Amino acid sequence: MSDNTILIHQFLTAATATLAQAGVEDSHLEAELLLRHCLDVSRSKLFLLHDQPVEEATERYFGELLRRRCQREPLQYIMGSCEFWSLDFFVSTAVLIPRPETEFLLDHCFSTLQHNASGQPQCVLDLCTGSGIIATILAKEFPRSKVIATDFSQEALGMARKNISHHDLNEQVHLLRADLLTAFSRTPLFDLIVTNPPYVKAGDIPTLEPEVRDWEPHLALSGGNSGLNCVARICEDAKSLLQPGGWLFMEIGSDIGQEVEQVFLEAGGYEQVKVVPDWAGQPRVLQARRMAG
């Protein structure tokens, strides 16, 4: 071993410092994840390799990934995948990176349906599907349900299709390109609509973290100046598409909870309308049920 040889643990320490200098939080964890991705090893295997020299090919590949992360490209985009609901999903800059807020959306949806003894819905809509994570989870939780997943972005639908296939759900989940609910005739079709629509106020986007502001698709983020553009359209159109007694669950921004609730209350045709706080106590999910009458 020459004096210029770099060992794995030295490489990791240097990468951690580089990421920290670039403003990346949890720099040690992210350096470790990137190196594990390069070496295709588990965390325990990486520990066993700590005193091994770094190969030249690994050094070059890792250097490129490190450069991208220092430009604040999200780790999930660099690796091309992420974990959600204890499952693996593909992601790219065509779709938002799944977040804990969306896990809360699904958790609240399932617990509410169970509490109300709603049974398994026959037809379910994942509106603004993005990467297809919500459609995938809905299909797995409701294996006898027909699931339709829509998005306006053709690129997002391509990523959703990749994830649907990855989880062997092609027969159950049907993808459709649509501008919100405009593709459907105004007849009751769905027992359940779950959606994570764009809800960030347009003026707030420049203030977001670089990983979001510079890399995630603004089409999936911006809800217009008020954050309510898509919310209002969904509220109005969903009334005629939900079966009587059908549920709608919508992820919302923590700063527009009262406004979203007011939109649904003033629209009429819904009951059990309320905004539910997430695990951090922030307004996060709008629930509404189509009146049976």
Image: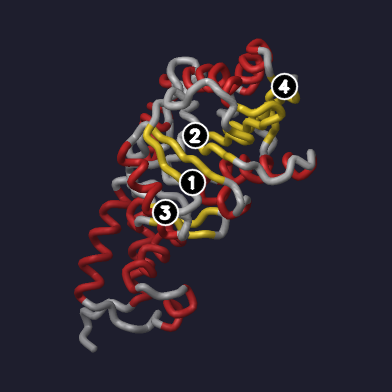
* Disc sitting over residue 291 in the figure: 4
- Please state which amino acid type lies under the numbered disc 2: Leu
- Please state which amino acid type lies under the numbered disc 3: Asn
Indicate whether 216 appears above or below 181: below
Tell me the distance, in whole angstroms, between the alpha carbons under discs 3 and 1: 13 Å
Q: Residue at x 40, y 79 (%)?
A: 50
Mark 3 / mark 4, whichever is N-terminal: 3
Tell me the distance, in whole angstroms, between the alpha carbons under discs 4 and 2: 21 Å
Residue assigned mark 2:
127
Q: Is residue 67 visible?
A: yes
Mark closer to the observer (4, 1)? 4
Tag 2, which secondary structure? Answer: strand
Which is nearer the eye, 50 or 132? 132
Q: Is residue 284 visible?
A: no
Tell me the distance, in whole angstroms, between the alpha carbons under discs 3 and 4: 34 Å
Mark 4 / mark 2, whichever is N-terminal: 2
Tag 3, which secondary structure? Answer: helix
Where is residue 191? Give x, y as percent: 63, 35
Horizontal side of 58 relative to 193 (left or right) equals left
Tag 4, which secondary structure? Answer: loop
Q: Residue at x 58, y 55 (%)?
A: 140
Residue at far bottom of view: 1
- The quarter of the picture where the N terminus appears is bottom left
Dots 1, 2 in contact, CB < 8 A? no
Where is residue 291? Give x, y as percent: 72, 22
* Disc sitting over residue 163 in the figure: 3
Residue assigned mark 1:
98
- Please state which amino acid type lies under the numbered disc 1: Pro
